[in-house]
Image: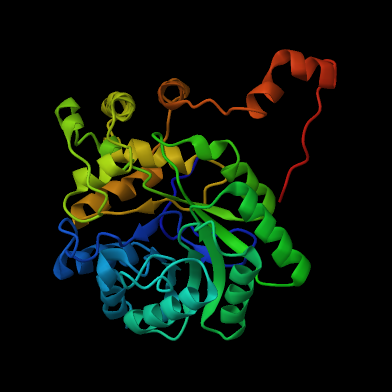
Amino acid sequence: MAALTLDTYRLLGRSGLRVSPLALGTMTFGADWGWGADTDEARKIFDTYVERGGNFIDTASQYTDGSSEKLLGEFTAANRESLVLATKYTMLRRPGDPNSGGNHRKSMFASVEASLRRLNTDYIDLLYLHAWDFLTPVEEILRGMDDLVRAGKVLYVGISDAPAWQVSRMQMIADLRGWSPLIALQIEYSLLERTGERDLIPMAREMGLGVIPWSPLGSGVLTGKYGRADLDHSVDASPSGTRKNVAAANGSLSERGLAIADVVKEVAAETGRTPSQVALAWTLREPGVTAPIIGARTAAQLEDNLGALDVEFADEHLTRLEAASAVDLGFPHEFLRRPMTRQVTFGGLKVEAATRS
């Protein structure tokens, strides 16, 4: 199989939008939270990615308290049209103001206007709902998104961190009402977090959303940087402080996570690769995945991550990685895969599913 490159572009969901197979995450742009890249290093990361053919940039309204978008506004000034800029709305922008966050229309429009100013652009290529708030009616969200698309301030819309049944419901409503469809689904997905294989990823493939995994390195745990001595780390709910705190707060820094990381390190040693490359390359193999997000903090880390594009696995390595990270798919998936269930359903007949384009 030929090696991937950043300029081997993929269509995003059921759209004609072309994006690189690895997205550049910019939550590390800005030192406001205590662990990100300063302006000069962020610029090196951005330039390296773009010079290699990368075009898919991911940020959010509140990443590093807005510094991420501001830096991107500077970095993209010379080549804005050639890039696909994705940002997100939802997170609280003013503590104490209940309408400065959430999924509702007021929050959406105000957040988009603020993002446009910081990004120094008059349109956003892809706007995600950042996290489900369990409060806002889906029709309000979809109509707001469609109005932004019709106004030319947003070109495409997507969703992040939401229940599969709500996403599929929204896609059906958008189709029936002629509103802008969702084309991308951003979820946590890695060797540490595979529960998206139960419903989110199959739903996305069925409903025409490209899957964009965040934290494909498990908050850094899969790089091998942490050990058992790090397990007693106290957890702070704030994203500021240290990367270790983020890993612990996200649940990635655990005994299970370190056990999986050990297998990743073994496979990396046997294949002459780094653990980061092995973990990213595994995520790229999932058929529903369009572009994992890499969140490098230095230009050297980015270069290492990009090496994942030409990793090839032996069957034995894949078997070990998947055995170490396996999750129970739960009901009804495990039930439907049982030999007795398949016997009474198919009676031993072999029936192949139709190929989807």
In front here: 212 or 195?
195
In the rendered structure, the answer to whether residue 342 lies left or right of residue 282 reads right
Q: Residue furthest top?
A: 340
Question: Is residue 280 visible in the rendered structure shown here?
Answer: yes
Which x, y percent locates residue 186? 48, 54
Q: Where's residue 239, x and y in %? A: 25, 54
**Relative to 75, residue 170 above or below:** above
The answer to which quarter of the image holds residue 23 is bottom left
Q: Residue at x 21, y 69 (%)?
A: 43
In the depicted structure, whether residue 295 falls above or below residue 118? above
Q: Is residue 160 above or below residue 164?
A: below
User: Along the line of sight, which residue is nearer the eye, 133 or 5?
Assistant: 133
Residue 316 lies left or right of residue 157; in this view the side is left
User: What residue sits 52% from the left and 78% below the top?
Assistant: 154
Occupied quadrant, residue 158? bottom right
Is residue 79 visible in this depiction of the protein?
A: no
Residue 121 position in % (x across, y down): 40, 84
Residue shown at 58%/36% (left/top)? 198
Quadrant location of residue 352? top right
- Identify the residue shown where x is 56% and y is 68%: 157
